[in-house]
Image: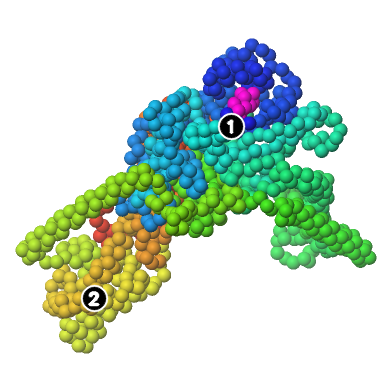
């Protein structure tokens, strides 16, 4: 069949699937009336069906009519999962049509169209159709490029990313997967349009496809030779969007986009092939690269048939299967196939599919979306599905039909035997006739333990004696008479009246058992338990051997001759209605997996791919697998220069027109870098002049140089007061202990005493509310192992403070300290290093101020203000901790409150959205867009489990609204907002400036730190 016939047949199949109409002539009439528009054809047939009652009978479909629609059941009851299309309500009717189309994951989806009434259409419309709400959002708000072009500069020959120009991650994932097929890349780059269309395109298809082809060539050339870290695909995307916007009710999903892309490329190459090979049957490289054929062999009501069909992307069901081979096995067999292998004329119907020709690039669509009839909305299937990095397709080939049938029969027989063994094993592992069942070996062990238990009885008399007055066990007649009277009087004694019956054992045990009985019983139970354990082991061993036999059934060399290696995995994260797409692509030259996530291209691993692609972990899973024939290395090999024999790379791969295009773009980028560098140089020169001017003014005014604020203040009334007191105390102690009274000797002694005091602080184990690093810079330096020279100069600076008491002793010591500072030579203390350590301490204090302020606001439930303080304190603290363990604060504590603050804001915003009131809704979405969403990449970037779970909780809260009834304006706002929330990029797109901090004295900072940490310690563990 030709490709056009194949597409025509696919349309017929989808119409039949959606409307239930089996009349081929009527289906063809609908397509003619609608000019191939599926939505109009459905409406045409629906009106027809509304007038004719549906037949409730079993319908069988001839395979020659089925074509590639493999999931139309060979014998499906018409009354199973039928959507009523006969009602009068046109809106409900259209919704039913859309839902049925969504459920049609089982067919090739070349031209499937959903309805705008459906929630999934509205969410995806933000991606391709860009509805009114998303048009209000400028690109800079979505993706703000760094103003510094050096941040956007490509490093060496790293792969080039693609900019997300408005929820177009689906475009990036597909294009990157195709671009990294080097044979496909070569075909696109070296494509030249047919000569006859240079003047005027003949039809609408040429008018659309040829410009798209040129934009794709331009995009590919930039991805090859650009100096940019990522490039902008807007022009190619715009052409796609224009094609998809032909009807506002039409909406394409990602798999349909891939179909459409390949269709356009196929058409473009077909035009070229027809021109190049006049009179011969043209070969289309796109068809040869991506399309294969299979043979459908079947029986229809006892009559055998064989038909050859063409296929492109091969759809596979995920639900109910654990790995890719199980999906393929199920896809290759339909109906009851026993009659296929017998010569008898049976009334059974069924069919098998056998590949006769596999394409070099074999693509599987994994159907992870299904429509939930009960809930009335599409749902994503999160089940785990494993797939191999090397896939051997021999068992599905027509040439291996007979041997595969034999092996399938053997596997079927083994599985039947396996089922029987598993049932037998289950009887051993879940023994009993009641609702609760236990392993039989354990039951026998419990019985043995019971039989061998010795009864330990308790007497009721002990309960009475325990409450009797002291006097011992002896009793006089008078006492006995008194007890008898008490027993006759009905006095309420809750403990004695509810005591255990006489002679009841303290634990379960036999009342009466002889030694002989016990010996026989123990012997029997022990023997039975050994027999049961042996039987269980034998069954488990047999089951394991059968599993192994099944696994190795196709491992002989004759069934490993058609190897396909995994080239790319396209991943979707999110729910059925919205989500984010990215791709894992194997780099054969570096022998590693690469992750292509919009502008971010990073090295990855098979382990990360498995975690994100198999499913069952978070909401991420593969929806498309691209395998390539491992015996056709030209698919991924670089091209060689025919003259020199050297590998063509970079710009050498490009034809002349594209070389010129890329050079122009690179020149623009180089010019941008030059302008930026010139601007920064001017700014630096201006800052240098300003500093020089300020220094000159300071020198002219003879202003004394001030030490750091935590070391000295101009007035002894604030931060320096406690430091002066410590210094004066050290001087007094030195004077009392030192015999020599010279200022230099006193200075040395005082410094040693002060250092010893601070060293004790640095080595002391303290409670969380005390941090001596805040009290003195030397404690911080000691804990972080600052150089000795830095410590000495800092202590000298402390004793050189002009604000020391004005008695002669302190003044003389201050003068000595200042003289010593002046005598320190530059080579003795590196002033750059000295300033670096002091700057590190200033950063520590600033981080502490952010942290304390954020935690205080969080305690007051002022989450909006607290967020930025917690965000910046976490980021600054992480930078500090990267240089040393004691340079910052507890990262887990800050991470917890950062996370909790975001969760609290998310809850508040969601509550506002649920209110439905316009001001509340606007405020809630504003909180999400301005505060929460920009912070999500910060939680994703380090891949911490608790942060990832928090993000998942926030997303799930908003995704839960998709299936709920709400006003249209709320639905529109939600549709606009969800793609931002579900964007998995770790690129920091826009962020608030850090909040302003007042200057706190050391005493104030220590007191506030102590108060907030003490308050946090009082919070229960689960609340922290």
Q: Nearer the viewer, mark 1 or mark 2?
A: 1
Task: Please say if 90 is above or below 222.
Answer: above
Q: Which mark is residue 3?
A: 1
Q: Is any part of residue 282 visible from this angle?
A: yes
Residue drawn 72% across the image and 60% down it:
466
Give whichever of 845, 772 is nearer the camera. 845
User: Mostly what secondary structure, the magenta segment?
Assistant: helix
Residue drawn 24% across the image and 75% down it:
829
Is residue 610 found left or right of 82 in the rendered image? left
* Residue 93: x %, y % from top left: 58, 19
Which residue, as the protein is rendered here, is positioned at the far top?
51
Residue drawn 20% across the image and 51% down it:
679
| Disc 2 crowd, CA 10 A, few/some/many (<14, 14-19, 20+) | some
Give whichever of 925, 583 is nearer the camera. 583
Q: Which residues are magenta?
A: 5-17
Q: Which residue is mark 2?
A: 829
Is residue 502 found left or right of 130 in the rendered image? right
Was residue 12 drawn as part of the magenta stretch in this picture?
yes
Q: Quick one: quadrant of the N terminus?
A: top right
* Residue 816: x %, y % from top left: 15, 79
Separation (CA) of disc 1 from disc 2: 80 Å
Q: Quadrant of residue 67?
A: top right
Was residue 743 drawn as part of the magenta stretch in this picture?
no
């Amino acid at each position: 069949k030709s490709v056009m016939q194949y597409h025509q047949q696919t349309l017929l199949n989808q119409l039949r699937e959606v409307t239930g109409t089996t009349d081929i002539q009527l289906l063809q009439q609908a397509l003619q009336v609608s000019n191939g528009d599926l939505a109009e054809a459905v409406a045409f047939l629906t009106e027809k069906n509304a007038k004719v009652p549906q037949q409730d009978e079993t319908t069988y479909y001839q395979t020659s009519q089925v074509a590639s629609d493999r999931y139309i059941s060979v014998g499906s009851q018409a009354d199973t999962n039928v959507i009523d299309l006969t009602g009068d309500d046109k809106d409900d009717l259209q919704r039913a049509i859309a839902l049925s189309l969504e459920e049609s994951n089982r067919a090739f989806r070349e031209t499937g169209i959903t309805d705008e009434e459906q929630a999934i259409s509205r969410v995806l419309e933000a991606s391709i159709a860009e509805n009114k709400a998303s048009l209000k959002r400028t690109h800079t708000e979505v993706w703000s490029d760094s103003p510094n072009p050096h941040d956007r500069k490509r490093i060496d020959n790293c792969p080039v990313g693609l900019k997300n120009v408005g929820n177009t991650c689906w475009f990036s994932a597909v294009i990157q997967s195709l671009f990294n097929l080097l044979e496909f890349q070569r075909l696109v780059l070296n494509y030249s349009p047919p000569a006859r269309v240079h003047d005027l395109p003949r039809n609408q298809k040429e008018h659309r496809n040829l410009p798209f082809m040129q934009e794709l060539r331009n995009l590919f050339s930039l991805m090859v030779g650009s100096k940019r870290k990522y490039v902008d695909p807007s022009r190619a995307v715009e052409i796609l969007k224009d094609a998809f916007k032909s009807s506002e009710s039409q909406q394409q999903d990602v798999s349909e986009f891939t179909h459409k892309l390949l269709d356009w490329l196929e058409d473009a190459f077909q035009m070229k092939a027809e021109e190049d090979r006049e009179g011969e049957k043209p070969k289309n490289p796109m068809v040869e690269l991506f399309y294969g054929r299979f043979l459908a062999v079947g029986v229809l009501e006892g009559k055998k048939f064989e038909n050859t069909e063409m296929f492109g992307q091969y759809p596979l069901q995920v639900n109910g299967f654990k790995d890719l081979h199980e999906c393929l096995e199920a896809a290759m067999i339909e109906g009851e196939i026993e009659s296929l292998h017998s010569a008898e004329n049976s009334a059974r119907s069924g069919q098998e599919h056998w590949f006769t020709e596999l394409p070099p690039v074999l693509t599987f669509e994994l159907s992870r979306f299904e429509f939930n009839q009960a809930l009335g909305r599409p749902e994503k299937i999160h089940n785990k599905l494993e797939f191999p990095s090397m896939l051997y397709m021999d068992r599905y080939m027509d040439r291996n039909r007979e041997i595969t049938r034999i092996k399938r029969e053997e596997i079927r027989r083994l599985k039947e035997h396996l089922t029987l063994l598993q049932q037998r094993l289950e009887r051993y592992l879940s023994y009993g006739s009641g609702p609760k069942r236990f392993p039989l070996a354990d039951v026998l062990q419990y019985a043995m333990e019971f039989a061998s238990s010795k009864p330990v009885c308790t007497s009721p008399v002990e309960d009475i004696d325990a409450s009797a007055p002291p006097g011992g066990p002896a009793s006089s007649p008078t006492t006995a008479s008194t007890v008898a009277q008490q027993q006759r009087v009905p006095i309420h004694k809750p403990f004695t009246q509810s005591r255990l019956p006489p002679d009841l054992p303290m634990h379960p045990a036999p009342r009466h058992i002889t030694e002989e009985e016990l010996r026989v019983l123990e012997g029997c139970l022990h023997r039975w338990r050994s027999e049961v354990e042996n039987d269980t082991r034998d069954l488990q061993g047999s089951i394991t051997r059968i599993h192994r036999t099944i696994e190795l059934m196709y491992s002989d060399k004759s069934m490993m001759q058609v190897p396909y290696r995994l080239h790319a995995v396209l991943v979707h994260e999110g729910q059925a209605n919205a989500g984010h797409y990215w791709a894992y692509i194997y780099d054969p030259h570096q022998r590693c997996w690469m992750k292509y996530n919009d502008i971010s291209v990073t090295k990855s691993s098979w382990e990360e791919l498995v975690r994100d692609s198999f499913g069952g972990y978070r909401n991420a899973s593969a929806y498309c697998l691209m395998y390539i024939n491992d015996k056709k290395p030209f698919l991924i090999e670089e091209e060689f220069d025919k003259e020199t024999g050297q590998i063509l790379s970079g710009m050498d791969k490009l034809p002349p027109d594209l070389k010129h295009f890329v050079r122009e773009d690179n020149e623009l980028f180089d010019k941008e870098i030059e302008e930026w560098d010139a601007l920064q140089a001017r700014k630096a020169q201006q800052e240098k002049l300003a500093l020089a001017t300020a220094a000159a003014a300071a020198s002219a005014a003879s202003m004394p140089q001030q030490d750091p604020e935590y070391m000295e203040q101009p007035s002894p009334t604030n931060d320096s007061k406690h430091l002066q007191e410590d210094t004066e105390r050290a001087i007094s102690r030195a004077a009392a202990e030192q015999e020599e009274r010279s200022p230099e000797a006193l200075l040395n002694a005082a410094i040693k005493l002060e250092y010893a005091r601070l060293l004790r602080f640095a080595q002391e184990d303290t409670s969380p509310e005390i941090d001596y690093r805040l009290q003195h810079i030397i404690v911080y330096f000691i804990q972080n192992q600052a150089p000795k020279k830095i410590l000495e100069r800092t202590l000298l600076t402390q004793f050189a403070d002009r604000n020391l008491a004005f008695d002669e002793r302190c003044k003389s010591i201050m003068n000595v300290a200042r003289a010593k500072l002046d005598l320190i030579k530059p080579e003795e203390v590196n002033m750059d290093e000295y300033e670096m350590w002091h700057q590190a301490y200033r950063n520590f204090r600033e981080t502490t101020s952010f942290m304390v302020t954020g935690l205080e606001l969080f305690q007051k439930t002022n989450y909006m203000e607290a967020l930025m303080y917690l965000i910046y304190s976490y980021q600054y603290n992480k930078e500090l901790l990267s240089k040393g363990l004691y340079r910052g604060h507890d990262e887990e504590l800050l991470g917890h409150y950062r996370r909790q603050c975001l969760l609290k804001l998310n809850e508040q915003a969601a509550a506002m959205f649920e209110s439905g009131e316009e001001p509340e809704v606007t405020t809630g979405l504003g909180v999400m867009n301005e505060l929460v969403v920009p912070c999500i990449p910060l939680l994703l970037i380090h891949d911490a489990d608790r942060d990832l779970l928090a993000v998942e909780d926030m997303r799930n809260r908003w995704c839960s609204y998709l299936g709920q009834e709400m006003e249209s304006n709320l639905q529109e706002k939600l549709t606009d907002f969800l793609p931002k929330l579900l964007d998995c990029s770790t690129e920091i797109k826009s962020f608030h400036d850090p909040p302003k901090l007042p200057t706190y004295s050391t005493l104030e900072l220590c007191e506030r730190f102590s108060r907030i940490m003490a308050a946090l310690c009082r919070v229960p563990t689960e609340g922290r």
